[in-house]
Structures are given as structure tokens and as C-alpha cells.
Amino acid sequence: EAPESKTLNIDFYAQSASEVGGDYFDFLPLDDHQMALVIGDVTGHGVPAALLMAMVRSCLHTQVLSNHQISDVMRVANSTVYKGSYERRLMTFFYSILDTESGLLRFANAGHLHPYLFRAQDRQVQHLDVSSYPLGVKATSNYPEQQIQLSDGDLLLFYSDGIIEAVNPQGEEFGFDRMEEMIAQLGHLGASDIVKSLIVEWRRFTEEGERPPEDDVTVVAVKFHRNGAAESRC
């Protein structure tokens, strides 16, 4: 379940392509009004991907108890994937810390699809476009930390490639352009309405109905409300 917060309105959707999958997302409350927002995707899906994902999750939950700083978490997570995958599986991984009072977001990205940022004031869609190698490519990698300031009503949208690379019966991809257009149209709504609308459109586009998708699909919406989280429909 999404954590309760006075300033954050959070909702998500996750569906595995098989009984277990390699997509990972998490919300970890930290000290001093800080919350870690995480999303990742292990190459492939099924049991091997799920096992590696579970290793990273366990490592992350242990690491943040003693040190949740971004550079240290990225270093430990990379080492876990590099040493723990005999099949040389990789994992994309976006790790961020949001100050739930000020709206300051600090983040690093190990090869994951760039999260979207919807600016409520001018309804513009931006990307958090810093990136580096996925986890597990090299024994040591540099994951630069960046930061961005959220304003009242801004939206963060995290997602996996299962929705972007989904294809319709004609072979056309759902794609980034379609995703960006929908975020621009829906970004002023509450998190649950945004997630629901994206998934309804994804199902309509792929004509999948209730069948399992070809790849794991994850969408996470986080809205920041400086004066208290509420479903925004303005």
C-alpha cells in the first residue's frame, strides 16, 4: 500500500507478465520528513528476474536503516546485482529522496526510463533525464546525484518499459509520445485518476482485456501538495 502523507497523493498499478515478475517499486519513509521513492526493472521476467529483484529489495530495506544517502545506496545496490546474478542479468534502478515538506527531490538513475515531471503551474511535461549504466554492468559505476524542486500540485510519474513497449495488433508501440500526451492532459487530476486513465488507455490500445501483458507493467503517480494532499481536479 502507498504510505500515508499529509502532502503526497500516491497511487500505482502493477501487473506481472507471469506469476512473478522483475519490476520493483517502493516507498520508504525516512527521517526528517524524507521519503525514498524507488522504481526498477530486472532484465527479463519470471522467476529469475523476481529472485534478483527480491535481493535488491532486501538489500535496500537493510541499507536505508543505517544510511539512506543516494550515493551509498546506489553503490550497494550495484554491488548486489553485479555479484548476485550469475546469468549476468542487469537491473535499471531509479532511487530518489523526496522532502515531503519542502518538495525538494534528490535522485540518481541507473539506466531506468526517465520519470516524468508534470508542472502544475504551466501544465508542461518534463523529464528527469539524468542516467548512467544499469546496475550490474560494472563492478563499480558512477551514479551522479541531481535535484529538482517540486511546486504545489506537481506530479511525478514513474513507469516501466512494459507500458511503453506494449504493441497493438497492428504492431504499433504505445510509445513515449502517447504517454507524454496523456500526462499533459491528465496531470492536473489526482493520482488515482491518472493511473486509472493510463491503464484504461493501455488496455484499449493493446486490446488485451484481462489477459497478462507481454512484459511486466508498472505505473506509479506521486502528486505533491504543499498545503496538504487531496485529489486535485481543478
Image: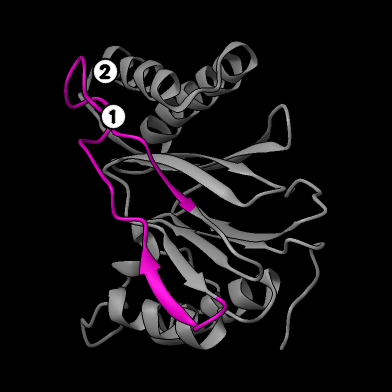
- Please, is residue 104 above or below residue 228 in the view? above
Instruction: Give how far across and how far down residue 121 sits, in percent.
Output: 56, 80
Picture residue at 26% right of the left edge, 32% below the top: 90
Q: Which mark is residue 135?
A: 1
Picture residue at 45% right of the left edge, 31% below the top: 53
Q: Quadrant of residue 166?
A: bottom left
Q: In terms of secondary structure, where does tag 2 sit?
A: helix
What colour scheme does the image use? one colour
Instruction: Give how far across and how far down residue 224 sits, in percent.
Output: 66, 61
Magenta-drawn stretch contains 138: yes
Q: Quadrant of residue 199?
A: bottom right
Q: Quadrant of residue 41?
A: top left
The answer to whether the residue labelled 2 contacts the one labelled 1, judged by CB atoms less than 8 Å apart, is: yes
Would residue 23 be visible to someone looking at this image? Answer: no
Instruction: Give how far across and how far down residue 79 sits, in percent.
Output: 32, 15
Magenta-drawn stretch contains 22: no
Q: How many marks?
A: 2
Crowd around label 2: few <14 · some 14–19 · many ≥20 (10 Å): many
- Please, is residue 55 above or below residue 172 in the view? above
Q: Which residue is mark 2?
A: 82
Residue span colored magenta: 120-148
